[in-house]
Amino acid sequence: MDTAAHATHYGTELRTWRMRRGLSQLDLALRCGTSQRHLSFLETGRARPSRGMVLALAGVLDVPLRHQNTLLLSAGFAPAFRETDMSAPDIGPVGRAIDLTLEKLEPYPTLVVDRRWKLIRANEGARRFQRRVFGGETPIGTNIMLASLAPEGRGLVENWEEVALWTLRRAQGEAMVEGTPEAARFVDELLELPGLPKLAQNPKAENAALPPVLSVRFRAREGIVSLFTTLATLGTPLDVSLQEVRIETFFPADDFTQKWLHAKG
């Protein structure tokens, strides 16, 4: 790709991200310390950005690191951010911090997942929960969002329709923010699961007051286990994979579940 083609390609990508963030050329120019005229030239391909300008504009637009690399490539530059293999047994201090987090959150089930909700790591609390409720452990690499909505486990979730609709809406929201074909395909994959399209089109109307958080109610042998989740991310990532990693912890929503999680068995 020649210089002119790079400039045109980058300009199209830049305009897409600007529009996605709901900013005018003037707004973006002011926030980035450049002129609206120069920004217009960049978007139309009449000017080619420097590497620093690509990164500055991407930073102001809050473009994820993965897509900042894509913007750099479209402008003719090498990617700036590496992508660590999160499945490697040793990923340095970050890996040790994640392992410590998993350990300290016992016995609460805690999962480490990537941007597409594929399982990377899990603590013993999570493995024990899976054995007690589902009769087996979830293999590393499983897409937990797809697995949670699959027909096989629906009978074990008392409020499956409520949870499924919320999960689908979260995936759709994330896809809108990301705005990539890959994210859209993932939503399509979810909508291919039996019952999801109908549920998405005709959600149940709830007149009752909403609780503070949505709890997932699992049917365990001993009774209904009710859990809500929290999500944690790394605060200052400069690596594509580390920015995308999420730590999801399931906490008890009632006293019975608290005792159930701490019980032996």
Image (tube, rainbow, N blue to C red):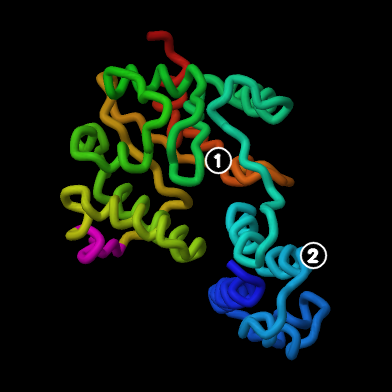
Q: Which residues are the magenta region?
A: 199-207
Along the line of sight, the residue nearer the viewer: 221 or 243 = 243
| Magenta residue check for 142 | no
- Quarter assignment of residue 172: bottom left
| Magenta residue check for 201 | yes
Q: Quadrant of the C terminus?
A: top left
**Residue 139, how many percent across, how many down?**
37, 24
Along the line of sight, the residue nearer the viewer: 234 or 160 = 234
Q: Which residue is mark 1?
A: 246
Q: Quadrant of the N terminus?
A: bottom right
Neighbour class for label 1 at 10 Å: few (<14), some, many (≥20)?
A: many
Disc 1 from disc 2: Cα separation: 29 Å
- Quarter assignment of residue 256: top left
**Among all residues in the image, which is located at the extreme front?**
2
Q: Which residue is mark 2?
A: 52
**Residue 109, how many percent across, how many down?**
47, 27
